[in-house]
Image (cartoon, rainbow, N blue to C red):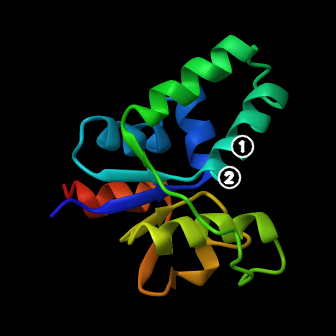
Amino acid sequence: MRPIIVFDTNVLLSAIGWKGSPYHCIDLARQVRVKGLICPEILDELTEKLEKKLKFTPIQVIQTIADLLSFLRLVTIANTLNFLTTDPNDNMVLECAVVGNATYIVTGDKRHLLPLGSYQGIAIVSARDFLTLVIPE
């Protein structure tokens, strides 16, 4: 059975700009070797960061989102989870994973998400660690 993954916004953003571990994680979903999940709230945050940090034009944003939605399953969340009070935006990632029955959350968030290690049985790992788990050497 293929792992079910929620990619945090920082992983998605890094995958767009560089060909490192985040890119290879997303590529596994593109190749359908893992099942990727995303929710509208993560898409909204990604859209904002693409516009502000990477200076994407509206057309580039639309193309990027359309590309992601071609291989990531859209999950609707209630946006009611309030587990992390230090960074409430991270709650949407946790909720997306719970609602979508994910097995992993892949993130680069060393301050809030990675220190948890897991949430409700969902492993929280870095992109590099995820690659070693899914593609053992």
Residue 116, position as x, y percentages in the image = 60, 82
Instruction: Say if 127 sits above or below 30 in the image.
Output: below
Q: From the image, which quarter does the N terminus lie in?
A: bottom left
Res. 59 image quadrant: top right
Res. 134 image quadrant: bottom left
Mark 1 residue crowding within 10 angstroms, few (<14) / some (14–19) / many (20+): few
Mark 2–mark 1 contact, CB under 8 Å? yes
**Which secondary structure lies at badge 1?**
helix
Residue 11, position as x, y percentages in the image = 57, 47
Residue that label 1 marks: 44
Residue 106, position as x, y percentages in the image = 49, 60
Q: Which amino acid type corresponds to the residue marked 1 in the rendered image?
A: Asp
Q: Which amino acid type corresponds to the residue marked 2 in the rendered image?
A: Glu
Residue that label 2 marks: 41
**Which secondary structure lies at badge 2?**
helix
Q: Is residue 7 left or right of residue 33?
A: right
